[in-house]
Image (spheres, rainbow, N blue to C red):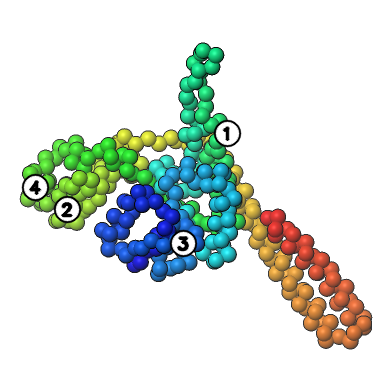
Amino acid sequence: MDIQIDSREKARAIRKIIKIFDEQGVNHFSSKLLVGDYMSLDNPRLIIDRKQNLQELCGNVCQQHERFKKELIKAMQANIQLIVLIEHGPDVQSLEDVYFWKNPRKHEVRWRIVNGKREKYIVSAKAVDGNQLYKSLCTIRDRYNVRFEFCEKKDEVKQSHNMRNVVESYGFRVNRAGFIPCPFHKGDREPSMKIYKDSYHCFGCGASGDIFSFVQQMDHCDFKTAFYSLGGTYEEPTFHSRLSVYKAKKQAAQREKTKEKLRRRKELNNILIDIYRDYMKKSEPYSDVWCDCYNALQYQLYIHEILNREEVIT
């Protein structure tokens, strides 16, 4: 596999990604892309645009709206499937979860001196919150055929935990060679699980992973519970926020129904236009049949213009 990396990507920001490419044996080179950040030469019609977090995406959608819009239009005109990949925490794993996100800029409080007195103030009270961003992303998805994918950002929790410390918290002793008896298969008399700095691998049963997967298998829990136990934080959505998401989904479904209904009306309209034109060609000019078809054709052309206007509005 050959990956083309956009030359405008900063070297410091993609250092870890390039390291993973090298470890996996993926060939890569740097060159300017029309849009996005990464493209596989095996499928040049699919390009990934990476965002470090929701705050960066929020800035593109709101503050740099025109520039971001031009890129989306370029991708659509070039028939490119653009995937926006957002690196965020486990609290945002889908587009619907964006609705629950709280923008740190909107809720960040600082102190300042006014007339010799200290008072609190919000850094950016007008910053876009999750519900507004969610609606904007849904519009972009429907209008420009963009996919939004989310991946979990584990670096922050990983940096505060060492694989060896996590293993020892379950009562295992790591020997000098860095091995422990594998807890995931029976009969492991000789230690067969190697403990690395941030991962593990068993040479007996093949079990491997990071601190999260180890906690998941030991406690028989899902990722969120493991994330909690390692000190991660997650805010549960409220009833009102869930209700708002439900309403937004319902409105999106209604819009899809309206588009489908409009599509069928246009299809019928085009069929009638073709029929009336064919009858006019076969009929004698200015005869009764020709005049009836002509009047009907003019009406269908008028309906055609109305349907085109409705399509632009929707």
Badge 3 or badge 1: first in the primary sequence: 3
Three-letter amino acid code at the position of disc 3: Leu
User: Which circle's residue, 1 or 2, is located before the other in the chain?
Assistant: 1
Crowding at label 1, few (<14), some or many (≥20) Cα neighbours within 10 Å?
Answer: few
| Sequence-first tag of 2 and 3 | 3
Identify whether 261 is placed above or below 279.
Answer: above
Query: Which comes before the other along the chain, label 4 or label 2?
Result: 4
Task: Kindly state the secondary structure of the residue where label 1 is placed.
Answer: loop
Up-down: is 279 above or below 150? below
Measure how far apart labels 4 and 2 are at the Cα level: 14 Å
Q: Residue 162, image x and y in percent?
A: 22, 40
The reply to whether residue 38 is in sight is no
Where 231 sits versus 214, above or below? Answer: above
Q: Which residue is mark 3?
A: 33
Secondary element type, mark 3: loop
Q: Are marks 1 and 4 in contact (CB under 8 Å)?
A: no
